[in-house]
Image (spheres, coloured by chain):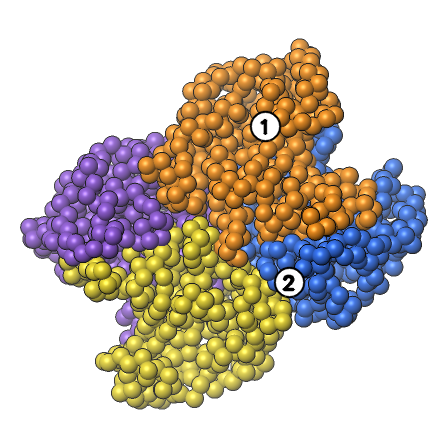
Chain colours: A blue, B orange, C yellow, D purple
Amino acid sequence: MSGNSIGVLFRVTTWGESHGKALGAVVDGCPPNIDLTEAAIQEELDRRRPGKGSSTSPRQEVDLVEILSGTFEGKTTGTPISLLIRNKDCDSAAYEELRNIFRPGHGDLTYEKKYGIRDHRGGGRAAGRETVARVAAGAIAKKVIARSGIEVLAYTQELGGIAVQAISLTEIGKNSLSCPDQKAADQMEKRLAQARKEGESLGGIVAILVKGCPPGLGEPVFDKIDADLAKALMSIGTVKGVEIGAGFQAARMTGSESNDPITPEGFATNHAGGILAGITNGDEITIRVACKPIPSIEKTQQTIDRLGKPATISIRGRHDVSVIPRIIAVCEAMVAICLADHLLRQQAQVGNG
Amino acid sequence: MSGNSIGVLFRVTTWGESHGKALGAVVDGCPPNIDLTEAAIQEELDRRRPGKGSSTSPRQEVDLVEILSGTFEGKTTGTPISLLIRNKDCDSAAYEELRNIFRPGHGDLTYEKKYGIRDHRGGGRAAGRETVARVAAGAIAKKVIARSGIEVLAYTQELGGIAVQAISLTEIGKNSLSCPDQKAADQMEKRLAQARKEGESLGGIVAILVKGCPPGLGEPVFDKIDADLAKALMSIGTVKGVEIGAGFQAARMTGSESNDPITPEGFATNHAGGILAGITNGDEITIRVACKPIPSIEKTQQTIDRLGKPATISIRGRHDVSVIPRIIAVCEAMVAICLADHLLRQQAQVGNG
Amino acid sequence: MSGNSIGVLFRVTTWGESHGKALGAVVDGCPPNIDLTEAAIQEELDRRRPGKGSSTSPRQEVDLVEILSGTFEGKTTGTPISLLIRNKDCDSAAYEELRNIFRPGHGDLTYEKKYGIRDHRGGGRAAGRETVARVAAGAIAKKVIARSGIEVLAYTQELGGIAVQAISLTEIGKNSLSCPDQKAADQMEKRLAQARKEGESLGGIVAILVKGCPPGLGEPVFDKIDADLAKALMSIGTVKGVEIGAGFQAARMTGSESNDPITPEGFATNHAGGILAGITNGDEITIRVACKPIPSIEKTQQTIDRLGKPATISIRGRHDVSVIPRIIAVCEAMVAICLADHLLRQQAQVGNG
Amino acid sequence: MSGNSIGVLFRVTTWGESHGKALGAVVDGCPPNIDLTEAAIQEELDRRRPGKGSSTSPRQEVDLVEILSGTFEGKTTGTPISLLIRNKDCDSAAYEELRNIFRPGHGDLTYEKKYGIRDHRGGGRAAGRETVARVAAGAIAKKVIARSGIEVLAYTQELGGIAVQAISLTEIGKNSLSCPDQKAADQMEKRLAQARKEGESLGGIVAILVKGCPPGLGEPVFDKIDADLAKALMSIGTVKGVEIGAGFQAARMTGSESNDPITPEGFATNHAGGILAGITNGDEITIRVACKPIPSIEKTQQTIDRLGKPATISIRGRHDVSVIPRIIAVCEAMVAICLADHLLRQQAQVGNG
């Protein structure tokens, strides 16, 4: 219980179900005197919204955010910031058949086993829609870390088995898949279109960069910055793996290959991904997360109902074919929240966050 | 700050430096009336000790644990359990040269940047030796989860690029590398011997299995069981990546491949790794972690000193060639601590942990 | 920072300013399958509302609560419960003069010193109106503890120097001051009318009883039940003192007077106030809190403005003459929240909350 | 569970039983580069030790503290500081008869009810001896707050019904009762001698002053500084009441009496006790705590045994007649720990702790 908050000092609590009245977040511990308007948050929310690409759902939530507290005349006051996003475009009737059946790959079964009760409509709290509150809170976190010159940037590294070959960060904003390699993006679009036709879904890999992070963030030995980043990212429903720097490739290196030589100008390589012994080293932080395919597919699947009897299911609701690219904004938000928290923690103990 | 505790209800706080007087842990929140003796903890500590294999350090700490509080007549009382392990075989003189130089791949630089002061002897708090306290606390966690029929088992899946081909769990205890494939183990030993000769070190991958875990553990949306497991494991100094179930492979699957069909007898496959929507589903939990090569190598490396001047370093202390197999017991400990905490959390809110 | 949450397992986060858009609370960790409707919460909120007695403010907020998440078909689901209360009857213009002046006895000065910015309208987050969110969350807590047979009851023990002489719990609901002694209540009403005429305000003492509390609640040594109750109650803006059982009188007793003899039928006396060594002993919990006079008074007072220059102030807004009786519902809410949390904590560690 | 830690950023975890092997504390989050030696901690511990006055126990623990981690060459390093105090002068045999009987006024009964098991020797974790760890940790907290010019000072205000009449802070150190009024101290000594002769014990009131505290500390709305101070102090076993500033007297004042007029030179009075709306206002913080008489008395008392049968008990062990003056150092420690934590919290969010 109490699992709906993250962060020690910059603390985000989220709430809300996919087809309930609303979703939202309370951000406690935000420093005072930071410019904050609904427009700035809206901008991030719009990045998470269903777009026009081949991967996204026909459900069209406007996702209008309302700031209910914690600001005064356009600035944060240091008191908790409450964010509200009403649900409007809910079509719960379409979910009525899910009341008594468990969708494979979804939380239907586990929520039922855990709580003995669940809001089956649209996946309830386990729906991807839950992340709208993360993105809203993340927009505030981004403002906090920007004061220290930190910027978070995520992009599509792989989708449906198609990996980027060349990385040009300026390309990211130019295609609907947030892909830094336009050629790869074109192939991904085709793969998405094919999957949609087949009633299938696709997984992918998101890469995250943090630029401008000062050294010294992270609280060994358990709240290391990489440990907290891993938690923050793995808490996104779709994520099945997280790696920092060289990640799983580091397991195949020798010490002399893996260690980043230190020079007066900085590190000669960055296999560490900007983190040494759980503390940022001043270099770019590099992270990759593995996203599983969206479990809601039209293809017929084998399952059981609430009585334990065998059943089949074909999910015809409005669903994305891949969490990419919508998950990009969510990954950025979680990393920003984690960094904002650690900035304040370092400032508390040592005074120079 | 305050980064040295983990867990909400089963809460472990560790302390101690590699070459300080001692290391230890305080375990708060352990249920009362559990049999607990120093011998049971010692058994786990001995698994972490430098062994006789090719990978391990000549430093020979007896690592005797003393229970200072929290038990009475051989049983836990519900009050905090304090564990003490004195450092004995310290050879700090060998580290004197490290006072003013930063070892590549180590926390020397980042501790200095973070705190403005560091205990350079043996890596201080950033040393692998810190994990002795984790293993001691983990031994208690194992007793807590055993009451619910849960068992944690880790083994070497890959070392120096050599992966196991066949998995026979009964083999694990039969070789010094905790490897479930004896043939692979033989090759790994050769690879280790070669690396030692070259003044190098090796990385590897550890696989972790959790058997007998009941469904319902995990606290969405941030304290999902996979999020907390990822944090617990990523907090181990050597770990650069964590994946659950199919992990990064899931990113290349389609929805119908990735989703585990549900049958009246259970799940037909286990790509989810025993976790759905952040809650255990009753199936085996499967995790893999990537361990980087030990950064202390004899091979000469490029670095800088505290004044920022270029320098070279060749580390000749007593070091392992790989964290495998000693890290195996540490991984098990962290998973056990995480599960013990979530068992109590589920018991608190729903009453049937 | 992050000071807007209370409770470890039954965790309440509140937000909102007196003259902002709304106030609210998020309750995380509530057990599932508890009946919960807006009407049940509304009932508690109505107890806190300005009444018809001599002590209360002319401001008339309807304080309609909306449950935005965490319930399904009238029952809690175990996910966070978000509660929203819109502000409607705000007259911020009346507060414009307070933008640049600090009211004595208020948080104006300290919020300014702490955050460097403050919402001056109606006292912002420091207003008594903040407690509406506590009462809403407390209504849920009351349902949680009622399942274990626990009931919280508070009443006016003293107001404006007039103390109750006889205690008849059945009288409490019969007068507008929640006073168990009708004769004293009559005198209190006169004292309130006089104070109002004089442009003054009054303080008082609230007594709180907890009936039906099982033994075993409380987590030594820091989260003792009396320590957590003291914090919960002292966190109410108006409270300047808390005592348990014999309280300050215990300081004047001898050991044989203070110790409650134990008999097979229970304790012969209850100077302990139902708590021994920080753990409930099964007897009634008894608490008293001292409430200071409301600082907003019409009488002219000496103060300074934001530039530090001397000034005088006479506050003519709509204010109560005493926090009693409206604070009664707030005290009950805080005690209920604290007990709900400790019930879950005991259930987690020992299994029989 | 997990009730043995206090503080969010400056976090103290204590452990240990009265007749176990040792007691201790882990202090996590202490800023680096603070001078810290065992001698400085020892000085505080010696203040808590049984003295030569009439009130104290013949048990003579040397209470030697050992710093096991977290310092390097006489300075804190920012890593957790582990403190160890071995128990030496235990006479557990004297407690054997307490295995099966519950002492009135003690935690014997409640620990048994809570955990189903207890270490009966010397009161186990519920013994006054537990506070030795608080004082050790408090010595470090005092160093942290001293950097911001904050000093904590406690003294005996009342003992056995005898209150100080005049307060001369310079007198405090001159008598064994830490009493600022030598004449009252003389009477208190007589009262103590008489109580000892009668097989009785006495309660009293401790006053605590905080000088030099900057404005701005405290985290509304739940972690107000007065709320956290109340918790910290009420968590001391002997404390039954806490009041801030005018405390219970404020309940009898009118608004114009209670409000402290603000002048360019500061507050004209200090009924607020240095705290407004849960935030320090720059004035002296004033607190009083009520201590109950020590429950261990020689006088025969009525009780029950573990089978619930009536019994009588006369406690002949080595016991103090009053917790005063030994509790003085404990009160100071708890206040210092609370302030150190809030200093860091303010520094984190606003940057000028």
Helix, strand or loop under label 1: helix
Q: Position of residue A71 (x, y in %)?
A: 61, 66
Identify the subunit bearing mark 1.
Answer: B
The image quarter in which residue B38 lies: top left
Tell which of A333 and C288 is nearer to you: C288
Q: Is residue B193 left or right of residue D253?
A: right
Position in image of residue D79 (x %, y %)? 48, 36
Residue A268: x %, y % from top left: 73, 27
Q: Amino acid at mark 1?
A: Ile
Of residue B88 and residue D143, the one placed in the foreground of this image is B88
Closer mark to the observer between disc 2 and disc 1: 2
At x 42%, y 84%, the residue is C56
Q: Nearer the viewer, residue D20 or D161?
A: D20
The chain that hosts pointer 2 is A
Q: Left or right: B138 with respect to C68?
A: left
Q: Is residue A86 visible?
A: yes
Q: Place residue A56 in its image quadrant.
A: bottom right
The residue labelled by disc 1 is B327
The residue pinned by badge 2 equals A118
Please tell me which residue is depicted at 65% across the width and 41% down the height of the picture.
Answer: B284
Disc 2 marks which amino acid? Arg
Badge 2 and badge 1 both on one subunit: no
Residue at x 44%, y 30% (from the top left corner):
B40
* Residue at x-position 36% and y-position 52%: D114
Instruction: Decide: is D304 above or below C99.
Output: above
